[in-house]
């Protein structure tokens, strides 16, 4: 069974691999419902940061050091991403298609190549803590629910394996996973780590070594008021 999905958090990593065979661009929203989740902080929900504020908190070339080149945002393609052989990601796609998908209030993103061979990307989101927590938890749970499945974009079919990874003890909540993609005889491993701190969600994806190297810096900068 196939079902179309536009789950962006997975697609961000998928495009790292599909770029080998022509994928371009990121979807902008992930599919998940967002029930209220009790928190232990102030009774008044913090106001989400603006997209301009989030952009100011993204890593830049001077933060990363030598050898990094900012990758321009690619033009979006209209190809749907299809999940084959795993029901939970399929259901995420169904939620998105009916309009009940995750819709974080504010977002910003940036991607870099390193030495022309490795990549790292950062995405920042801002919304209520409960909505961030519920939404990203649902996406990670869905992606990790099957150890292996396939994803397709246009005529490209990618074999995908998922493995939960240990996330560093940062912020209020943490998620991390390793994704192994195989397509057209090529193989790539992508690490995705997400950290929620209050009303900000920091996600860093890409080559595992680069994610580990820059995650602390991305987290610290995202928390810094401008």
Image (spheres, rainbow, N blue to C red):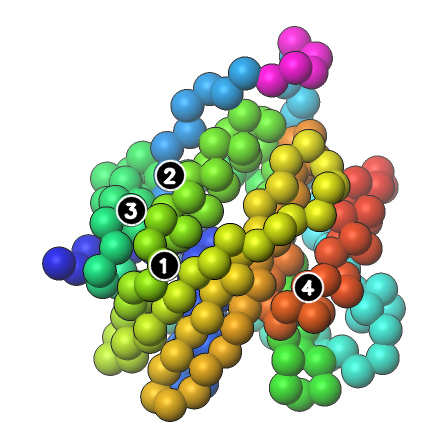
First in sequence: mark 1 vs mark 3? 3
Could you say which disc has been placed on residue 32 in the image? 2
Residue 181, visible in the rendered structure: yes
The residues bearing labels 1 and 2 have C-alpha atoms spaced at a distance of: 20 Å
SS for callout 4: helix
Q: Which residues fall within the magenta stretch? A: 39-43
Q: Does the magenta stretch include residue 219?
A: no
**Residue 126 in the image: above or below residue 45:** below
Residue 85 falls left or right of residue 153: left
Residue sitting at x 46%, y 19%: 36
Within 10 Å of the Cα at label 4, are there few (<14), some (14-19), or many (20+) other Cα atoms? many
Quadrant location, the N terminus: bottom left
Q: Are marks 4 and 2 in contact (CB under 8 Å)?
A: no
Q: Nearer the viewer, residue 8 or 161?
A: 161
For the image, the number of numbered tags is 4
Judging by the rendered image, the residue that carries numbered circle 1 is: 147
Judging by the rendered image, the residue that carries numbered circle 4 is: 211
Quadrant location, the C terminus: top right
Foreground mark, 4 or 2?
Answer: 4
SS for callout 1: loop
Judging by the rendered image, the residue that carries numbered circle 3 is: 88
In the displayed image of the protein, which residue is found farthest to the top?
Answer: 43
Q: Nearer the viewer, residue 48 or 168?
A: 168
């Amino acid at each position: 069974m196939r079902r179309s999905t536009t789950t962006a958090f997975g697609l961000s990593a998928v495009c790292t691999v599909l770029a080998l065979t022509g994928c371009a661009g990121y979807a902008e929203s992930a599919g998940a419902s967002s029930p209220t989740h009790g928190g232990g902080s102030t009774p008044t929900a913090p106001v989400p940061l603006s997209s301009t504020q989030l952009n100011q908190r993204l890593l830049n070339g001077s933060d990363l050091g030598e050898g990094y080149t900012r990758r321009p945002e690619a033009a979006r393609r209209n190809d749907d991403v299809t999940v084959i052989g795993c029901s939970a990601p399929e259901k995420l796609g169904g939620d998105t298609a009916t309009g009940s998908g995750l819709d974080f209030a504010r977002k910003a993103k940036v991607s870099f190549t390193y030495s022309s061979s490795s990549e790292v990307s950062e995405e920042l989101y801002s919304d209520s803590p409960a909505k961030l927590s519920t939404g990203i938890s649902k996406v990670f749970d869905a992606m990790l629910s099957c150890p292996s499945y396939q994803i397709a974009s246009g005529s490209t079919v990618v074999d995908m394996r998922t493995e939960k990874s240990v996330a560093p003890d940062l912020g209020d909540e943490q998620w991390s996973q390793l994704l192994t993609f195989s397509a057209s005889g090529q193989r790539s491993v992508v690490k995705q780590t997400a950290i929620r701190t209050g009303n900000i969600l920091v996600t860093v994806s890409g080559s595992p070594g680069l994610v580990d190297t820059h995650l602390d810096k991305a987290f610290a900068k995202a928390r810094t008021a401008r």
